[in-house]
Amino acid sequence: MYAERIILETDALGHLKQQPLLPPNKAVEAIFLVLEDSGDQAARRPHPDIVGKVRILGDILDTLPESNWDLPR
C-alpha cells in the first residue's frame, strides 16, 4: 500500500471539476479533508451597484489619529 496526495476541486454545486485517473483493478480508500479557503481561490469583488462609482482620494488607512481608535493601552 502507498499514499498519494491528490487535491480535488469542486464547482459551485459541489461537483468535481476534474476526476483523477486511478490505478486499474485496484481498491482505493479515500479520506476527504476539506481545505480552508485561500485568498486566491475566493477573490473578493465589489458589489455590482458600486463598481466604477467609488474613487479613493487619499490614504484610507491613516484617516484618524490613533487617539480616536479607543485602543486598550
Image (cartoon, helix red, strand yellow):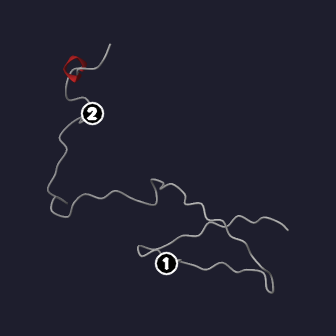
Residue that badge 1 annotates? 15
Residue 36, x across and y down, in percent: 51, 54
**Tag shown at residue 27:** none
Q: Residues within 10 Å of mark 2 (few under 14, many from 20)?
A: few
Q: Is residue 1 above or below residue 20?
A: above
- For the N terminus, give its image quadrant: bottom right
Q: Secondary structure at mark 2?
A: loop
Instruction: Report the side of 40 relative to 53 (left or right).
Output: right
Residue 69, x across and y down, in percent: 23, 23
In terms of sequence position, does the residue under pointer 2 or pointer 1 come before the other?
1
**Tag shown at residue 61:** 2
Are circles 2 and 1 on residues that touch, CB within 8 Å? Answer: no
Residue 19, x across and y down, in percent: 61, 80
Three-letter code for the amino acid on which mark 2 is drawn: Leu
Taking depth in this image into account, of 46 and 70 the one nearest to the observer is 70
Residue occupying the point 68% across, 70% down: 30
Q: Cα distance, mark 2 to mark 1?
A: 40 Å
Q: Is residue 62 above or below residue 2?
A: above
Which corner quadrant of the image does residue 21 belong to?
A: bottom right
Q: For the image shown, how many numbered marks are present on the structure?
A: 2
